[in-house]
Amino acid sequence: MSEISKQPYEQETLGHPTGLFYLFFAELWERFSFYGMRALLMLYMVNEIFKALTERDVAAAAVYASYGSLVYASTVIGGRISDKILGMRSSIFLGGILMAIGHFVLAIENNIAFFLALSFIIVGNGFFKPNISTFVGSLYKDGDRRKDSGFTIFYMGINIGGFVAPLLCGWLAAEYGWHYGFGLAGIGMLTGLIFFWSGIRKNVFGDRGLPPSREIYEKKILGIPQKTLVPMVAFLATPLVALLLSSYKSLGSEDSFLADKNYVNILFYLIGIAVIIYLSIIIYNSKPDERKKLFMAVLITFFMTLFWGFHELSGSVITLFADRNVNLDGIMNASQTNSLNSLVIIILSIPISLLWAYLSKRNLNPRTPYKFGLGLVLAGLSFYILSLSGGSADANGMVPFAYLIIMYFVLSIGELFMSPVGLSKITDLSPKRIVAFMMGIWFLSSAYAFQIVGFISKQLAIESTDVNVGGLDTLQVYIDGFSLIAKYSLGVGLIVLLFSPLMKKLMGNVH
Ligand code: GLN
């Protein structure tokens, strides 16, 4: 059949279903909004929202951690509601609209608006992020070999957004004010939705992403059809989430279990216990060969949690370090340094996936546990490099920019060893009947990572109300912190490498 006589949803562009490129641009712009905002978030909290507090770093760390944990945990709920009721299309629209509202509300200068805005982004991301990723998968038939490269292209889109946004939003925030930066993030999100909508109009998705059952979609509860009820509940949930976020103070006095813990921390303890019990039951009830693989799926998710726990410090402690202790030489401001991670991913993701293919042909492609061990070692190495920067600090306690660049370079290679590999291994290691649930658990790894980020960021908090704090006053705190993180990450990475031969066996035929 010639390309012309094919329906739009059967046509291909660059060897992939044409729909991929609409999803690519939709996700590119959504991540533009997400990472543009994230680049500003910590500095905005420290310098605006909490500027009057001596403990402003601690407060900002707590809110950053709660935001990050909830923004990823909500994907588990959003994915489930999509599977059961809404379908991917409606979920993506609902999520995108909520996120855009969030970014625009951030442009309002007011503390209540601030917490409400973050909660719109949390609920919105829950509907958007898991569904756009599953949508990509749905474009390919089972066993289609182009799927992996489709995901690599998609990951590039994510990182093009993640690269450009901090540069533009960071520039706008510095030149014209924070709220212009946040406003641009909102425009980015709307642009993403327009791309998605035009894909639907041009019929490039065929019947993919429609509600799983019209009957359930239209079914009335309390006289309201579910298709309307879900968005209503989503909107009504936002003030509650905002309330959770704004209760960032610790619940207990020093030395008690509750010291350093707020409601969100407690919530994640409880979810964690429930998930562990539930997973143990699932593993216990599985067939023996499934059991080993599932155990490995849980284990690599745990390693990924640790890695993101160090990696996601980029938006918090490392941005503050860049602001207070790095000689950026007028090349960029501290928010803009957030684009470095994505830049390296854009440059290296294709060469690294080609490297795996090259090694595969020679039977030398390392098995997954080795890649994960190496990823954690690389994370450790990157923080070690950053800790060395202290030795090159000038008389004002400012370190050369090159250390930060090299640090991001090494850390991002670690990311490429783990994140895209893990994503596909989860689908290979989980029995088909629970693969969507295991994907949810995979996203929870990012949620828990932010609990680690919160803990570390609080340890490295500087007490001061001086907006210009930095230099010699803060250098040693950061350097000591980075060297401790390096030791932990290197230690865990080496342990993983040590046990890799054993883990390899548990994975059976999965590479
Ligand atoms: N950078 C990737 C993204 O934004 C992965 C983030 C994560 O899972 N923590 O999609």
Image (tube, rainbow, N blue to C red):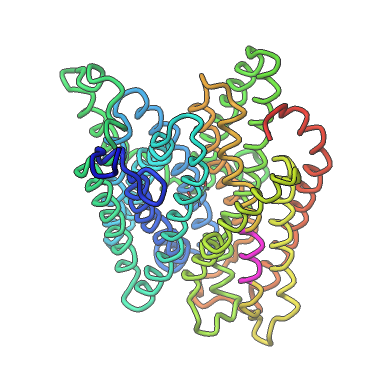
Q: Is residue 405 magenta?
A: yes
- Between 394 and 116, the one lying in front of the other is 394
Residue shown at the point (38%, 55%) measured from the top left: 28
- Report the quarter where the N terminus lies: top left
- The quarter of the displayed image where residue 208 is located: top left
Whether residue 221 is visible, yes or no, is no
User: Among all residues in the image, which is located at the extreme bottom?
Assistant: 395
Q: Is residue 118 magenta?
A: no
At horizontal 75% and vertical 62% (from top left) the residue drawn is 483
Pick whichever, 361 or 214, lies toward us: 361
Query: In this orientation, does residue 121 appear?
Result: yes
> Which residue sits at x=52%, y=61%?
346
Q: Is residue 195 left or right of residue 348?
A: left
The region drawn magenta spans: 404-412
Which of the pair 44/362 is nearer the observer?
Answer: 362
Q: Residue 11 in the image: x percent, y percent?
A: 31, 42
Image quarter for residue 367? top right
Q: Residue at x 60, y 17 (%)?
A: 282
Residue 404's spot in the image, x, y percent? 62, 71
**Rendered location of residue 22, percent (x, y):** 32, 49
Image position of 182 (left or right of 290):
left
Identity of the residue furthest to the left in this view? 223
Q: Is residue 250 above or below residue 464?
A: above
* Position of residue 225 measured from the top left corner of the image (x, y, whole percent): 19, 22
